[in-house]
Amino acid sequence: MKKFVLTACLVTLMADPVESASLSKTYSYFTIGGTNLEEIEQELKRRGPQVTSTGARHPGATRMEFNTRVGYGERNGRCGVVEATVRVKADMILPRWNRRKGSDSDTRFVWDTLSADIKRHEESHVVIARNHARELEDALKTIRNERSCELAQEKAKQTSARILAKHDREQERFDKIEGINFENRLLRLMRYRLEREAGQAPG
């Protein structure tokens, strides 16, 4: 379940203080049909969000945008960052199944397990982004005592580029690990759901 990660960095010279890091999340859905697992799989491949870098479609995706605002200040002939805010906007794209009533109980059970895992996967991508946003904000605030604000701004750009590249690598690494462990993870989740439902059944 690879993601398309869109990053944007805006560095501006500001006089007014800016707020602390923030995260906003939105959810959008694509509808799939199918009354059995094979049909559902084909629907996900046909209707899932398309990743620009590979051209492939996936069961879920997260579009993310980083917006960085930096304020600079001069003192004793030196310039540095006095305020830095990193805002992350995440749009999670998830599947919605519309043929539940026409399917059997086993198919519904597997779908519930799978859809929950897809959502967990996308939420994990958002956590990775949020952690790197905090790292970027903290790193920007350490830029001090530069000979000019132009040099401080250049250092801020380099810092942003470095940490955003690190963020993208971490997202790719997470997808790779999740892809390798997908089948075993899904089996564990189904076993857990079965045990939970058995424990909730009336004696």
Image (cartoon, grey):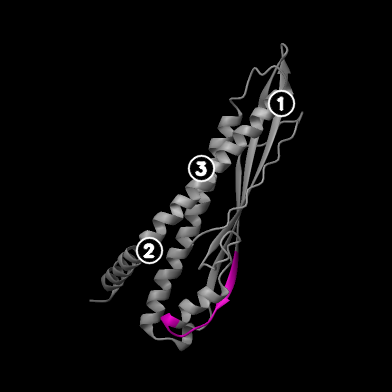
Q: Is residue 91 left or right of residue 38?
A: right
Residue position marked by numbered label 1 in the rendering: 72
Q: Position of residue 19 (x, y in %)?
A: 66, 37
Q: Is residue 114 left or right of residue 60?
A: left
> In which quarter of the view is residue 194 placed?
bottom left
Residue positioned most to the front? 54
Q: Earlier in the sequence, mark 3 or mark 2?
A: 3
Horizontal side of residue 183 vs 45, given as left or right:
left
Q: Amino acid at mark 1?
A: Tyr
Residue 92 part of the magenta segment: no
Most extreme residue toward the bottom is 102
Residue drawn at (35%, 66%) of the image: 183
Query: Circles 3 and 2: CB distance less than 8 Å?
Result: no
Relative side of 49 to 83, left or right: left
Front in this rendered view, residue 128 or 116: 128
Figure quadrant of residue 75: top right
Q: What's drawn in magenta, residue-wise?
A: 28-38
Query: How far apart in space, not on screen, are marks 3 and 2 (Cα)?
Result: 24 Å
Q: How far apart are the alpha carbons under marks 3 and 1?
A: 24 Å
The residue positioned 57% from the left and 57% from the top of the image is 4
Disc ID at residue 201: none
- How far, Cα to Cα, is label 1 from label 2? 46 Å
Q: Secondary structure at mark 3?
A: helix
Which residue bears the numbered disc 3?
131
Q: Secondary structure at mark 1?
A: strand
Mark count: 3
Q: Which dot, 3 or 2, sits closer to the camera?
A: 2
Front one among 6 and 112: 6
Q: Which numbered marker is on residue 182? A: 2
User: Which percent across, then down, holds residue 180?
Assistant: 37, 60
